[in-house]
Image: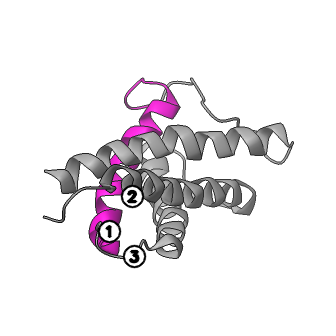
Amino acid sequence: MQKVILPLVSGFLAALFFRESTLALLHAAGLVDPAGFSTAPFVPLGIPEFIAHALWSSIFAVLMVWLLRVAPERNAPWIGALVFGGIVLTAVGVFVIDPARGIWPSGNMLPRLAPNFIANAIWGWGALVFMRAFMAGSEPD
């Protein structure tokens, strides 16, 4: 149970505290147009985008824990979390979620991918921060 619930909660919180905050900071610095914490409706579900991103992130946190073998008795894979968040979440967003919303990859995608890659990489790191904090003092299963 701990191997599912903790990553779900960690991924959800990391999306709110790390991913969306990173987008908000990049927007405040004038580097990107979309600001964090977007309340625009997420097309298929109709819920605010930042909540939809947090829900998706919680699911991917479970996958990240399984792939990186995050456990209290092991060293934390900080670089792996950054790479997982940056590559996997960005790729799924571009090739799965966006086409489901009617947005197809085309043209020069770097201006759109770069901030998402940065925010998603920070999410991976933040999810690991929350997981390690929640696992502190817990006994291995």
Q: Is the residue under label 3 in contact with that under label 2 (CB below 8 Å)?
A: no
Q: Which numbered disc flags the more N-terminal residue, 1 or 3?
A: 1
Disc 3 marks a residue whose amino acid type is Asn
- Residue 108 marker: none
Task: List the single residue furthest toward the front.
Answer: 137
Placement of 95 over or under 11, stated as above or below: below
Residue 128 is one of the magenta-drawn residues: no
Compared across the picture, whether 102 is left or right of 19 comes to left
Please tell me how many numbered marks the rendered image carries.
3
Q: Residues within 10 Å of mark 2 (few under 14, many from 20)?
A: some
Q: Position of residue 6 (x, y in %)?
A: 28, 48
Q: Residue tagged by mark 1?
A: 70
- Distance Cα–Cα, label 1 vs label 3: 8 Å
Q: Residues within 10 Å of mark 3 (few under 14, many from 20)?
A: few
- Secondary element at image label 2: helix
Q: Which numbered disc flags the more N-terminal residue, 1 or 2?
A: 1
Image: magenta residue range: 43-70
- Secondary element at image label 1: loop
Who is closer to the viewer here, 106 or 136? 136
Disc 1 marks a residue whose amino acid type is Val
Q: Is residue 117 visible?
A: yes
- Which of labels 1 and 2 is toward the front? 2
Q: Position of residue 13 (x, y in %)?
A: 44, 40
